[in-house]
Amino acid sequence: MKNNTKITFSFFIKIILFALSLCLITGITWIDAHDSSLNEKFGESSWTEYAQELILILTVIFGSIAAYKLPRFQILLSSLAYLCLIYFIREWNNYLGNWWKIGVLMVSLFYLPYLFIHKKEFWKQLVSIWETFPMGIFITGNLILHVFSRIYGKTEIWTATLGENYHRSVKNASEESIELLAYTILFVGVLFLIEKIYQKHSLDISQVHI
């Protein structure tokens, strides 16, 4: 009974922290919306863009550290970190031009052979946590990023909606805010996944000692 109460309490704490994270990123978009110093709001020099890059690099760092500390799920955690590193490089496309593709290629040339060699271990690790709550969050973040935001940010939608009042900043505000939401969900999903894996790791150690 006590254990169930602890699990329930932990779950609601996570939900509250998740909600606070969403409030924080909403505050960032509010700041950008009220910034009158830029001709084009929500561009590459906006706080929303900086927040996206920060969240992605934090996800890469936490995923990489967890991969080192939790060797039983090293391939999976490294793969999640690799994926978010690609997203991070992609976010620099306006600074790097088409050179961002070279960055992605270089990282992939280093990592994909490693993943191919350990593909069986990767699949085994993935299957073991595929239907967990944290993985559901991570997948949801990816779907929002690659499906919803791409469609929702189409210029045609906003020109049809606003007509003669169309301004690119409105489209940017919508698209970049949705991307920030997606990256935040990815980050939360990775953190929850690390916690889940750590719990499995601790349980396995305790069983060995028993």
Image: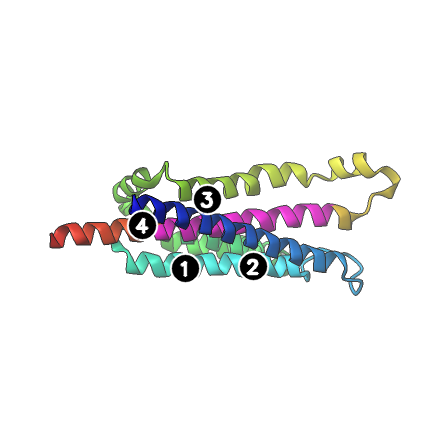
Task: Give the side of residue 159 with respect to residue 184, left or right.
Answer: right
159 in relation to 189, above or below = above
Q: What residue type is labelled 1?
A: Phe
Q: What residue type is labelled 2?
A: Glu
Front in this rendered view, residue 91 or 96: 91
Q: Earlier in the sequence, mark 1 or mark 4?
A: 1
Q: Mark 3 points at which residue?
A: 138
Q: Which residue lies furthest to the bottom in this view?
A: 37
Q: Earlier in the sequence, mark 2 or mark 4?
A: 2
Q: Earlier in the sequence, mark 3 or mark 1?
A: 1
SS for callout 4: helix
Quarter of the image with the N terminus is: top left
Residue 77 is at least partly visible in this image: no
Whether residue 176 appears in magenta in the rendering, the answer is yes
SS for callout 3: helix
Magenta residues, start to end: 171-195
Query: Label 4 vs label 3: CA separation?
Result: 14 Å
Q: Mark 1 points at which residue?
A: 62
